[in-house]
Amino acid sequence: MDMITAFAPNRAARLVMSTALAAGVLTGCASGGAHPDKYASSAQAALAKGTTTAAIDNAEKAVLADPRNAAYRVLLGNAYLKAGRFESARQAYDDSMELGEDSSRTALSLALADIALGRHAEAIDTLNSYRDSIAASDYGLALALAGQPQQGAQVLAQALRGGENTPKVRQNLALAYALAGQWREARTMAAQDVPASELGDRMEQWALMGYSERTRHRVAGLLGVPLRGDAGQPQALALANFPATEQLAAEAATRAEPAAAPALAEAAVRELPATEPESPAPSLADSSSQSQQAQLALIDLPASQPAASQPYARPAAVPARKKVPAAKPVAAPAKAGTHLVQLGSFSTPEGARRAWRHYTARNPELKGFTNVTTKVSVNGKAFWRVQAAGFGGQASANSMCGSVKSRGGVCLVMRGSGAAMPGPQRPTESRMAKR
């Protein structure tokens, strides 16, 4: 379903960004009987009516009834986001992705919540992990909002040159130019869709959006949601309160055999440590100067669904920008690996974990290789490099890298100075062999 609102020539041009809010509810099989589905249906119906209080109440009940259902946590994030509760929305989307949710819609919504909270590094990590499946018009504007306006403008300009000459792309590009301080280009591009009598007001609105401390205002205006504070979702809903069966079994085994636990300390960085503490949320500024009539974007907050008695159906995934060809066979993990495939470099350990999950979901053949995530320092700034280890030579690594690229990803082939095979070994990087 196309979630882009049609452009009305007789009205001021509005920026449009498609997110999970326009996708409706993503649902799965609930383990708690019919009650979670009923709560979720009630939440979706409330969202369609714009009654966010009821939507949040029912979505929270659905999550409590089936806490490890990723779809219900996506629904909860949608309800929080429509209510302007960015902290709570961010947590709900993050929890859903920890449970296996891997859609570009959810990733984009998570990135927008992070942008609103000033967590630009986390937002960029998420956007870069999912850039193969997020539409260029959304990806470029989101990059610009996350503090990379020039890169975002490049993405949007390329989409425009590639044939996506639409009001959405043009106006998103105009805003990216404005955020980059390129006001002449911004005005010229905006003038293609904005009436001359309204162009000055539009430039003034974009100038106000340029202030970094107005990140909440910026995202709230684009999404058309209220601007309010938020203490976060109830602690009772925290995913940590509902461990998976495998985790419970592992903890029980650890308690039964305490002597075996220390051996894990020598393992490679396969699963990164817990997410770093969040930075304090920006204080809310006075929103009285930014009326709802000055909204720069319009999104269908969640698309209307049938009443609660209707069964759920998972919406079709957003198509990737390029058609994904069939995967080519790649080599199996080698016993004495010599090469690695680097999948990306991320600003946060959280972003690195999410990237590995996304790449292995998009490229199942990667699951047989070892996730080696290494913290490095570049010009005094920490990054986490995500690599797949266990390739027996450059040819097999090139084959895997080609498969990743065919699905829209990026990668580098590198050579390790020692064995790199599945298991607790940690290879040592030497040099970049091939881009």
Image (cartoon, helix red, strand yellow):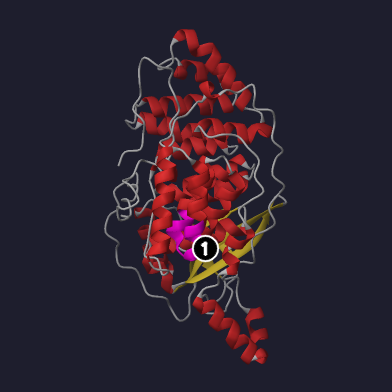
Query: Toward the viewer: 341 or 13?
Result: 13
Residue 84 occupies which quadrant of the picture? top right
Query: Within the magenta stretch, is there residue 66?
Result: yes
**Residue 342 visible (yes or no):** no
**Mark 1, other Cα within 10 Å: few <14 / some 14–19 / many ≥20:** some
Query: Toward the viewer: 151 or 331?
Result: 151
Q: Position of residue 252 (x, y in %)?
A: 59, 85
Residue 194 lies, with reference to residue 251, above or below; the image says above
Q: Position of residue 131 (x, y in %)?
A: 44, 47
318 on left or right of 358: left
Residue at the disc numbered 1: 64
Point 30% across, 42% down: residue: 1
Q: Which residues are magenta?
A: 61-74
Residue 163 lies, with reference to residue 104, above or below; the image says above
Find the residue positioned furthest to the top. 197
Query: Within the magenta stretch, is there residue 426?
Result: no
**Residue 293 visible (yes or no):** yes
Point 59% across, 41% down: residue: 115
Residue 195 lies, with reference to residue 152, above or below; the image says above
Q: Main secondary structure of the magenta part?
A: helix
Residue 111 lies, with reference to residue 264, above or below; the image says above
**Hey, what amino acid is under mark 1?**
Leu
Q: Position of residue 298 (x, y in %)?
A: 44, 30
